[in-house]
């Protein structure tokens, strides 16, 4: 907060994981928050069509005639929770089998000690299964565990991530298919919104919703 005041910022774009937003209110300038754990009710949000992303992934697997569907999520995060919800609702429409597991976003040291539950869950899933990870980083965890256990991707687990982070997706063997989001358009819309706030043309909070656009298909689903 001290830095923002000294710099005399005209507006702020931030990912704010702290409880409450009372400190940000004292700045009295436009603030746009990239939501992570929750959406702000006071400030504008840079958010996403998380429900639609999950539904899009489910239809991808449904069109390939899967009967078993699984979701691996990031505990406590609105974007993960809603992607899971959209995925589950589409699966339920066709009477598919749905399986869910979530964990915290682990650092390297925690991951090396805490993969056992994920290991057990992946081994217990009926195969073949279409699995959506909440993002590419979590998809990479799945890929690593499958390799350790000799679970074949994509023959037993067809694996799909979100964000199309090319570095992460191509670290995996096989490389991970992923849902591409229109993040660049979101950046333009944030810039446009800030311009309107500074010119006093807009005052009320507004949600900028980033949409999923397409699949970048790689070997993990093919």
Image (cartoon, rainbow, N blue to C red):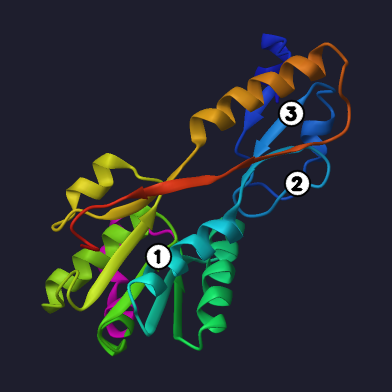
Residue 194 can be seen, yes or no: yes
Q: Quadrant of residue 174?
A: bottom left
Q: CA distance from mark 3 to mark 1?
A: 36 Å
Residue 146 position, x and y percent, is: 19, 72
Q: Residues within 10 Å of mark 2 (few under 14, many from 20)?
A: some
Residue designated by label 3: 31
Nearest the eye: 101 or 92: 92
Residue 222 position, x and y percent, is: 20, 62
The overriding secondary structure of the stretch rendered in magenta is helix
Q: Quadrant of residue 10?
A: top right
Residue 100 position, x and y percent, is: 46, 79
Look at the image and say whether residue 80 sits in the magenta stretch. Answer: no
Q: Are marks 3 and 2 in contact (CB under 8 Å)?
A: no
Q: Residue at x 78, y 41 (%)?
A: 21
Residue designated by label 2: 40
Nearer the camera: disc 2 or disc 1: 1
Q: Residue at x 50, y 29 (%)?
A: 184
């Amino acid at each position: 907060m001290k830095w923002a005041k000294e710099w005399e910022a005209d507006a702020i774009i931030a990912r704010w994981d702290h409880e409450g937003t009372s400190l940000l209110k004292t700045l009295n300038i436009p603030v746009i928050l990239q939501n992570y754990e929750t959406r702000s009710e006071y400030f504008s949000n840079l958010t996403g069509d998380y429900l639609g992303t999950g539904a899009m992934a489910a239809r991808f697997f449904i069109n390939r005639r899967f009967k078993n569907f699984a979701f691996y999520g990031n505990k406590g995060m609105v974007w993960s929770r809603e992607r899971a919800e959209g995925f589950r609702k589409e699966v339920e429409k066709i009477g598919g089998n749905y399986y869910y597991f979530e964990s915290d976003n682990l650092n390297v040291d925690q991951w090396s000690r805490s993969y056992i539950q994920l290991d057990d869950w992946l081994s217990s899933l009926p195969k073949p299964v279409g699995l959506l990870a909440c993002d590419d980083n979590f998809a990479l965890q799945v890929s690593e565990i499958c390799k350790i256990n000799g679970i074949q991707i994509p023959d037993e687990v067809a694996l799909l991530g979100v964000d199309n982070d090319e570095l992460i997706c191509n670290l995996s063997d096989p490389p991970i298919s992923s849902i591409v989001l229109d993040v660049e358009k979101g950046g333009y819309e944030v810039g446009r919104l800030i311009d309107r706030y500074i010119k006093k043309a807009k005052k009320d909070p507004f949600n900028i919703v980033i949409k999923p656009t397409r699949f970048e298909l790689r070997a993990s689903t093919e």
